[in-house]
Structures are given as C-alpha cells and as structure tokens.
Amino acid sequence: MELVARGTPEAPELELNAGLQHLGVAQTALGQARLHYSYSQAKSLFDAMLTAPGGGSLLLGGTLGLDLSLPAFQAAQGPAKKVDRAPVEVSLRARRFDPTFLSGISPYVRSLGGLMQADANLGGTVGAPTFKGALAWKDGKLGLMGYGEYHDIQLALNASQQRIELKQLTAKSGNGSLALTATANRQGKDGEFILEGKGHTKNLPIVVEDQLMALLTLNLSMKGSLSERLVNISDLSIPEAHVELPEAKRKDLQPLERPEDVVMVRNGVPVDKRKKKEKAPTQVATSQKAQNPRNAPDSPGMPGNPASTVGGSGEAGSPTSQAEAEVLAEDGEEEEAPQRQFWVNINAPRNLWVRGTDLNVQLGLSEGFRVEYANEARMFGEVMVLLGRVDVLGRRFDVQRDSQVRFTGPVMMPYINVTAEHRNENANVTVFVTVRGQGKEVTLKTTSDPALPESEIYTLLATGRRTLERGSGASMNAGAQAASVVGSFVANEARKAIAAKLPLDVLSIEAGDSGIAGTKLEVGTYVTDKIYVGYTGRVGANLQKGENANAVRFQYLFSPRWSLEGMYGDARSGGLDLIWTKEY
C-alpha cells in the first residue's frame, strides 16, 4: 500500500494505491484486489478491481464531487449531510463474477453466490442516481437473516433513463418457486415511470424470523407508477391465491430488532441522534376519494403525497432556509430525510384460500383494500370470509359469511368480528362461537340453540354429547365434568402432534376418596359421534369382589334417547345395558 498526501487542510490532495493477495471474508478466499483512490479540488476519483478465485472479475470506477477539506467538516452542514446531493459517476463491469465472498459481510446477508455479468453506468447524485446498463445474475444464491434462503436465482435487468425492464426474475426456496417480469416506461423527460408486471409463485415458503409461516401459491398482475419518493401500485390484481399453513405451531420468540426504549450511548452521548418522525400517511384506501383520479393520493397537494408542490412554501415546521437548517442541526435533532413510500391497492374480491389441518376458508378483500409502508406498515380495508370451516376441539364449525376482519391503520390492531356455528345432529343442538374485539382485546362467547349452560356447551364440543356419563348410577359434579372437558381438550391437542398413533377424545382422572387408592382413569375415543370405545383403570381394585382393575368400555348411541352400553374387565365382571334417557 502506498499513500501520498500533500497540500493544506483547506485544499488537501491525497493519492492511495493498494493491492491485496489471498483476500477473503471469514473462511472464503476472495483472490486478488487492487484499489486506486485520489482526491483533489473537492473531487474524488477511484477505481477498484476484484478477481475471484475462479477467474471472474469485477471492475468499479468513478468520481464523486464532495468537499472533504477541513472547513467542510467544521461546518454545521458537513459532508455527511451533503452526500445525498453530491454528483456521482460510477461504471461497473463484471465478467462471471462470483459474489460468494460477500457472504456474512453483513449480519443480514447470511449467504450469497452465483455468477454476475454487468455492464452499467451510474450518474446523477447519490440521493437520486440515474442508471443505465444491464445486469445478469445466474444460478444465484441469497440467504437473508430471518427471511429464509433462495437458490437458483436467475435475474436479467436492463435499465435506461426512459425504460426499466425486468426481463426475468426467478428463484426457488425449499420446494417452492417464484417468477416475476415487469416493465416501467418514463412519461416525459423527467416524469414518473408507469409500471406493469405479472408473476406467480408455487408453494413458496413465507419465512418470518426464521420460522415457516405459510406456503404461498398465486398468480398476480400489477399496474402503477414509480417516482423518486413513491412506489404506487394502484392495481395489484390477484385472481386466485392459496395459502397452506404449516402443522407445526409458531414459536413466540423475542423480536430481532432492538427495542425502541433501548438507547445506545458512547461516553454518555447517544450514538443515534434523535430524528423527527415522518408524519404517517393520512390517505385511507377505503374512502371514495381514493377512487377518483382527481383525488388520487399521488396527485400534488393531497395529504400523504410525498411530492412537493411547485411554488409552495414547503411543509409546515420544515426549515425554509440554510440558516434554520443549521440551527436545527446544532440543537442535536436531525430532520429525517424523506423516506420512499410504498402504496399498494389490492384487487382480490374472492378466491383467497387459506388451508391448514384444522381450517379451510375462502377470503375476499373489500374494494380499495390498501397497504401502505413508510416507516411502518399500515392497512386499510376489510378481509371478508366468503365460506369455509374451522375445526375446534375436533368439531367442525362453519364460518358465517358476514364474518370480517377490518383494518383501519396499524396492522396489529384489526377489528375482528367472526362467528362460526357447529351443528350436532345427535343432540339436535347448534353451537355458536363468536370472536370479537380489537388488537389484543378479544373476547370469545359461546351460545347455543336451544340455549344450554356454558358447561354443557363445552362438554358437547369436547365429547359430542351433553354429558360425559350415561346410566353410570352415580352423579358427576361440575368440577369432575370440567376436569374431563379440559382433559379432552389436552388430549385433542396431543392427538395433533402424534397423529393416529394415540387417537384420544376423552381423558378423565377421578381422585379416590383416600388418596391414590380408588383413583380412576378413563381414556377413549369417539369413533363416530355415535360410537365410543374406551379403557378404564382403577387403582386398588379388589378383584375378589368383582372390581375390575382394567376394563374395556363400549357405547353406541342409536338415537338421541336410546343407547347401548357394554363393559367387561379383568375381574371377569361386565354387563350390557339398553338405556333410555330423558333430560329435563
């Protein structure tokens, strides 16, 4: 490495030449690297060449117009705050370049690979660059922290000042795949881009926080516009989509992001300066104004529109002069640079299918359903249940058509109003379960027709019958019934995990009058709503007195009032009863 410095602090001149052999990140060898940098008269010139072990190469060169003198750093608006407005020219040439060496260079990029071909030029400013050229990525690999890994990536992109064309973007993840093509044509010399595209996915894993959330299969088409500060997909049409939910329950893990109330300091000074929060967009997708092009959110002057109005005086509260900006910076509070916003109007009135081991529903989105993202995600509109069923406690519930989930902004604060009904033909009872509330304040209410006490409703859901015992000659108190219902619920959850290896519907434990002795255990399964087969065990049973320590039990309900029950055990004691029952 060779470094030469000359000039004065007010007009410095620098020249750097460096070369590296056997360069690598972690255990990955990069090969060779060559770097040249020079600075003079507020202008930087640089070029770098990387040579991969396999022979591929990447050449990067260009200029940056940014004052790096001592007076520039001493000013309130230093180089760091002016870099977005600095003119830049960059050329990129890549020939069969393998970016594997970048794997792990960022905590968010776990793996990276493939072969890249590039012939591109970058101009404009750092904050608003212009791009012209072509980029190809073959047999690519990308692993992102918390969002899974993708392989067999094929990318072909051409771009100019007037047209951006995504000729191909395909990728695979697990056993799933995705494909996307799109074009964007500029309207006028400096106008926005008009976007059109289409794509599809097949069994694509949706991974969040390194946990599988769903497998997604869909077809889509989109239309919209692109500008410096706004990506507005005005029509994202999804004619059909299938979401397959995994059987494994999601683990509730601590978020990967640093909590907002944790402040990192260095020598007692916060590392990150406070920034003014950007005002949340006020445009609501479900309003009729959003449907009128004259009132569209991307029209100048509308609330939430990131574009500035020509000839206006600027936003209220924003600095109107360089002096005011410097005063604001000296107070230690930065004016946050405007963020790029994303607005998506989704057109999917039906055929959004969500399936899992215990549900199968068809959803639809209300007209004008909208998703917005700037510094946080926001949603507006209704998710409607068109038809479907949900299994609860092993019983089928049909979701009523007027059920809905309504979003009015924050994604985690929807208003839920869902009602499902279960029909038990044997008991001639219909059970209704209603879930209603907003955010975490959600209530569950059960009712029935004809009206039953809540304990009988849960007993009916757990066992298919209004009572757990029939004709036993002994009454069952409410506490014993509740314990049996809870046991049935636990057993039903266990059955999901062990599938058909141990299919239980009833798990009942009754304590004896004198400790362990006399304790009774019953496990069984309802083969159908009419047939029950179970096992009963009793601790301390006296076989000499005909008390069964182990017994098999059978019940057959052939009408709402008539049933046949049989039992036989290891004490050679048993019986067969025909029972008629009338409940009051």
Image: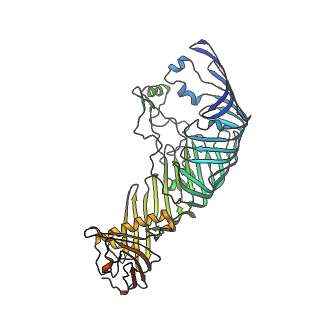
Residue 165 % position (x, y): 70, 45
Q: Position of residue 169 (x, y in %)?
A: 68, 48
Write the residue at 62% across / 44% down. 142
The quarter holding residue 431 reads: bottom left
Q: Is residue 96 left or right of residue 512?
A: right
* Image side of residue 540 versus residue 565, left or right: left
Could you say which is closer to the camera, residue 55 or residue 70?
55
Q: Quadrant of the N terminus?
A: top right
Asked whether the viewer can see residue 283, the reply is no
Residue visible at 25% across and 68% down in the picture: 514
Pinpoint residue 578: horizontal percent, then vertical percent: 38, 87
Instruction: Give the side of residue 339 with respect to residue 125, left or right.
Output: left
Vertical side of 552 occupied by 289: above or below:
above
Instruction: Give residue 316's quadrant in the image.
Output: top left
Colour mapping: rainbow
Q: In the rendered view, would you say 205 is above or below 306?
A: below
Instruction: Using the image as rendered, state which of residue 367 and residue 487 is in the foreground.
Output: 487
Q: Is residue 166 visible?
A: yes
Closer to us: 97 or 227: 97
Quadrant where the C terminus lies? bottom left
Spot occupied by residue 67 in the image (x, y as percentages of width and height): 58, 21
Numbered marks: total: 0
In the image, residue 553 sits, relative to residue 160, either above or below, namely below
* Horizontal arrangement in the rendering, residue 328 relative to residue 98 (left or right): left
Depicted 491 relative to depicted 379: above or below: below
- Residue farthest front in this picture: 544
